[in-house]
Image: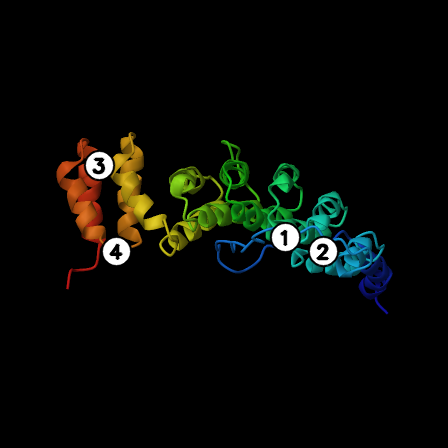
Amino acid sequence: MNRRAEKNLFWFPFLLVCALFAPSQAQPPSSPVKPQPIYEQCPALTAGKTIDDAVTRAIASLKSKDAKTRTRAAQQLSQACDRRAVDPLIELLNDEDPLIRIAAVEALGKLGDPEAVSFLTDLINDNDWRVRMALISTMASFKIFRARNAVLNGIANSNGAEITDENDMRVRGAAILTVNQLKDTQYSRKAILFLHFFLESKHENIRRLAEQTMYELKNTRNGPTEMYAILKQHYYFEIRRWMAYWIAKLNLENAREVLQHAAANDADQRVQQAASEALKQLPAAK
């Protein structure tokens, strides 16, 4: 056996052990950025009185040492519409296992007790991106300002921080899209404006995910309308120019009419020019 073969045989067991015990990291999903579902919350929470019933047993199972048992119990309680489940699920938000925290977040979102919102808000900076992604659906499902504002300004908004992690950006993009699915439109426009910052990132992977989010805005409830409003109303000419470009790039319905209006009537000639150039990028009118 030659020296090279002997060396490889020496190192192979060591490398195998390293591979087996190396810390695992969640890999970014390959799917495009998408809005998260909005839950149909319990219309009301009842207060069960039976001492030994399914809810009582599920609550007891939340303390099991088995992670799968705790997860199943949380999922069961999410359908119970029973107020007794709320406090035990809030306690589960502190579980060391991120998958357990996710199950608790989802269950509380489906139960819909507003008292849980302040505890859920504490997870906005959770170190696992999957927990933050789960928070989007849950917080957006509460029809109260502090919950939905947490999706907008707690999850979508980077507050000027440089974003480098793809998972982080994917969560922010999903939050932007989700608030643009809400019937309440007060969160939509600001969410879209966050994308202007992300699209200027020096990191190609972040720009790519921001572009994916822009393309998906076309399919949201509020995205096209809010983009038109930004072009017509935003005080800063550079934002209006940016929006003219994207309205054409996405070929939004009524894009030609809106861009023609901006090309003729915007108060800033730079925006007029941008709108005129954008019109040239639209497919020929039939």
The residues tagged by marks 4 and 1 sit, at their Cα atoms, a distance apart of: 35 Å
Dots 4, 3 in contact, CB < 8 A: no
Of callouts 3 and 1, which one flags the residue occurring earlier in the amino acid sequence? 1
Kindly identify which residue carries mark 3: 271
Which numbered dot is residue 106? 1
Residue at the image position 38 percent from the left and 40 percent from the top:
189
Q: Which residue type carries mark 1?
A: Glu
* Element type where label 4 sits in the image: loop
Which numbered dot is residue 253? 4
Q: Dot 2, crowdedness within 10 Å: few (<14), some or many (≥20)? A: many
Of callouts 4 and 1, which one flags the residue occurring earlier in the amino acid sequence? 1
Q: Is residue 148 above or below residue 170?
A: above
Q: Is residue 138 left or right of residue 256?
A: right
Q: Which residue type carries mark 3?
A: Val
* Element type where label 2 sits in the image: helix
The residues tagged by marks 4 and 3 sit, at their Cα atoms, a distance apart of: 20 Å
Dots 1, 2 in contact, CB < 8 A: yes
Q: Is residue 192 visible?
A: no
Image location of residue 89, percent across then percent down: 72, 48
Image location of residue 246, percent across then percent down: 31, 47
Of callouts 4 and 3, which one flags the residue occurring earlier in the amino acid sequence? 4
The residues tagged by marks 2 and 3 sit, at their Cα atoms, a distance apart of: 53 Å
Q: Dot 3, crowdedness within 10 Å: few (<14), some or many (≥20)? A: many
Residue at the image position 43 percent from the left and 37 percent from the top:
197
* Callout in the foreground (3, 1): 1
Kindly identify which residue carries mark 2: 74
Dots 2, 3 in contact, CB < 8 A: no
* Callout in the foreground (4, 3): 4
The residues tagged by marks 4 and 2 sit, at their Cα atoms, a distance apart of: 43 Å
Dots 4, 1 in contact, CB < 8 A: no
* Callout in the foreground (4, 1): 1
* Callout in the foreground (4, 2): 2
